[in-house]
Each structure stands twice: as structure tokens, then as C-alpha cells.
Image: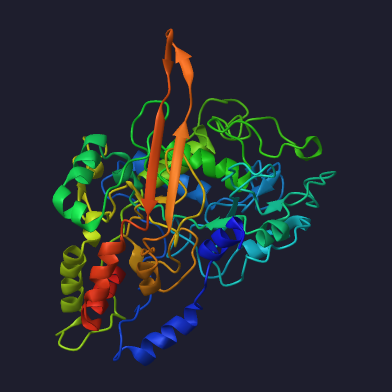
Amino acid sequence: MKPLERMSALVLPVYTAFVIAIVLTMAHAAHAQTDPGPRPSTFGNATRLPNLTDDQAKFWGGGQNVFKQTFSVSGAISGEPGIGLGPSYNGNSCVMCHSQPTVGGSSPLANPQIGVATVDGAANILPSFIMANGPVREARFILDNDGNPDGGVHDLFTIAGRSDAPGCALAQPDFTKELSNGNVIFRIPTPLFGLGFVENTPDKTLIANLQANPNIKSKLGIAGRFNTSGNDSTITRFGWKAQNKSLAMFAGEALNVELGVSNEIFSNERRATAACVFNTTPEDITPASGPITTTSPSSGTATQMASAMENLAFFMALNAAPVPAVPPNAIVPPGEASAAASVANGQTLFTKVGCVHCHSASLVTAASQFPDLNNATFAPYSDFALHHMGSTLADGVSQGQAGPDEFRTAPLWGAGQRLFFLHDGRTSDLLQAVEAHHSPGRDCTVLNSSQQFEANGESFSPDTQSNTCGSEANAVISNFNGLNAAGQQDILNFLRSL
């Protein structure tokens, strides 16, 4: 088997139909541990931090409106006022990817990419891996055409054929060919709740948290390290591999990569074929839409005077964190008095088996001008560090210092209402997601880095080697599997309570 074929077999998704999972939950609840499924949504829209000033609350609301705004090529199509879609794109709004359980969440069950492929006359062929029952996906290639590491997003669609893109003939990537070579991996949207807490957590807090309980972590095989910024060496913390430093950068990247909108952080068009570029760059600027009024171009609300990127960053920063609750569909194992007792015992076992040593239950922010974020304790259930996950989850992509099998510990707050799990959304079953954290120890990766150069009149020959065997979670998953069915069910109920 070719290396890429082997990688494909490891990372291509295996889906469990959502409805079937619920039916199996009901049928087998009394016999074995089962994912009880997502909790019903308790709110119809994203909620903001509660102690904002009136002006801040209005700015957050305006940012949410930008988040829900539909983009077209030049903003001239009715109902599609956002400017700058394409030349290539994965979606035409932020909310289409981040809507479960509400605005700002993760992938919905009904995949909106089905419709956006041909909206406004676009002539795209739907890739085979985009399915009506989700999840929303982006595609990355492991290697480029020359056999070198790629890892970049290859947008699913182009604006060719759209009524507002006359003359554009940009072709979609050849996904059929790359799939046959095992060269395609996937990512799904990350939830965007509570991110102001994450952004305002000091590096020293994250470092101390990672260094805590060294003896226990060593026995479990847990190490971890941080991805860092090449500009200022501080910890980066957003994205599946913690590749983005700030929410502003996170928003700017999403605008540019997912929608094709050039902006003040990512100022150049992607796939800028001459016949497919219709706007000046960057397309998203401050103020976002040019003059606010014909007589006073420098006046307006905070939302009007900010770029789309700034609006999106503010919206994400001031979103409230997910609120835990005992799920009404929790399965009560034999011997448990109630669903609440099961969740409480699941939280205890979550710590006992060792999950908590990566999925940290408590962190504290720095001082902040926003009262809700000021020296605040929050519960993300993540250490925001990179961990080796082995071949079961490896995607072959390096971002920053994160290697082919390294991922940021996914925050678990809000997991109770998610429909898809893991970086590629390969399963809707929480139990399968837990088990996928295990990777056979025999599957090892050896990474060598050697170079010679001269600087300051001296010769340097740095040589580093990294051996990765299996997943850092192997011992923890072994502990989980060592529990009886009731104990495992309690942990699943606890996770669905978050």
C-alpha cells in the first residue's frame, strides 16, 4: 500500500448516521454504554457576555449581523451585501458553517454547502465528500504536485458561472484525483463561544497548567507542548492545531480562506486569476463599506466604522461561554439514582481515568477592561497545548510548530450540543470519538531536522530528532476501557452535560 493510501485509510471519515445513532441509543441503553446524543438547544441565538456597556453590546450585536451576512462578489446582489466573495470559497457567510446549536457554533446537520455550490449561477460540481447530512468541511492536500508538504486549504468552489463574475473560468481543484491518491484530509468548523476567555488567558497560566502534575502525566505518557507565534514567541491557541495567535487573525484568515475576502490582515487574493478578480484589494477595509454617509464619511456606529474582520473578532471575543446542564436524554446506568448523579460520577471518573490532564477543567484569565473577562475563572476543558495523537487521528499536516499527528486539545465546553466530533467530523458518536484517541504504539513517526549554516562568523549544525509512537492518550483510553459499562456511561453523560 502506498504511503498516501495508508494515510487515507487512517484519516478518511467513517460516518455514523445521526438518526441511527439515536435509535441505537434507545435500543441498547440498558445493555451497554451509549452516546445519549446532543442536548436540545436552550437558546435561539448566541448570547453575549452579560456585563457589557450599552455601546459594547450594540457593537457585539452589529458584529453578529456581519457574522450572519451573505457575501457576493461585489456586494451588488440583493440580500448578499458582503463584498469580496471568491475567486474561490467554501461558503458565502460565516453562519452557514457555525450554526449548531446557534449562531457562532459548529457544523449543522443539514449541510448548507450543498446549496452554495450553485448559488447565483455558479457552475460548481459538488465534491463527493460533501454530503447533505453534514458535516460542513474544508479540504486540505497533504502533498503538493511536486511531492512536497502542502497542508493548505483547497477551496471547494469557484465563482465561475456566477451572475456577478462574468468572464471568470476558474476551475475547481481535481478532488477526484487527489482522493484517489489518498491526498485529501478534512477539517470541520470549531465552535466560537467563550473565546474572549481563551484569548485573555496569560501564557504563564497555560504553561503552569501544562507543567502541573508531572508525575501523573509522565506515568500516563502525556507530554504536550505549545504552538507559538514566529513573530513574538507567545502561545498561539486558536484553530485545530492552535495555529492562530489572535481572534483578529482567526477572523482574517477565515474571511480570506473560507470566503475569499481579502482584508487588512490577509490582504492578497487567493487564486487571483486575472479574469476572476473584480474588486480592489483589500476588499474588507476600515470603514468596511466606504463612506458611511455622503456628507460625513468618517461618522457612524462602531460596527459601521469597523471592518468586517474587526466586527467578527469583537463578536467572537464577547460571546458568552457554553453553559453546562444535565441532558434530558442522559442514560441512567443501573445503580444510579438520577441523571444528575450519573453526570456527577462521570465528572469524578473523567478526572480519575486521566482525561482531565489534557482537558483541563479550570483556567483563569488576566486583568481585562471587560468585567466578565477580568481575572475570571472559566472551564474550557482544554489545556490549549499540542499533543501527539498517533496514526488514528494524524492528518499529515503541519501548521506552525504542530506536526502531522499533533492537535490542540479540543475544548469540550459545549460538547453536549455538538453533532460532529474530531477535527474531520468523522463521527457523530461521542463514544467513537473517545475511542479514536487511542493509536497503536507500533505506529511510529521519526522526524529529523538537520541543516548547516554560518552566522556571526560561526558554523551551526542544529540537528533534532523526534520519535512519536502512538497517542499520548493511549493510557487514558486504556483506563476508560477498564471501567465497567456504567462508569463509561457516566462519563458520556458528563460530556453531554457540558
Residue 313: image location, x then y, percent: 44, 41
Pick whichever, 430 or 190, lies toward us.
Answer: 430
Residue at image location 44% in from the left, 69% down from the top: 419
On the rendered structure, is 110 left or right of 462? Answer: right
Q: Identify which residue, 243 or 110, lies in the foreground.
A: 243
Residue 102's x, y, as percent?
43, 62
Query: Which residue ends up furthest to the right in the rendered image?
Result: 167
Q: Is residue 164 shown to the viewer in this render?
A: yes
Q: On the rendered structure, is 28 left or right of 133?
A: left
Q: Is residue 240 visible?
A: no
458 versus 68 height, above or below: above
Count of marks placed on residues: 0
Which of the two residues, 96 or 23, is positioned nearer the viewer here?
23
Looking at the rendering, which quadrant does residue 58 occupy? top left
- Specify how the rendered protein is coloured: rainbow
Please determine whether, in this image, residue 253 is positioned above or below residue 110: above
Q: Position of residue 317 (x, y in %)?
A: 37, 43
**Image spot of residue 201 (x, y percent):** 26, 40
User: Which residue corresponds to the image point at 57% horizontal and 50% vertical from the top-left?
Assistant: 69
Q: Quadrant of the C terminus?
A: bottom left
From the viewer's perspective, is residue 90 above or below residue 290?
Answer: below
**Quadrant location, the N terminus:** bottom right
Residue at 29%, 39% in the rendered image: 200
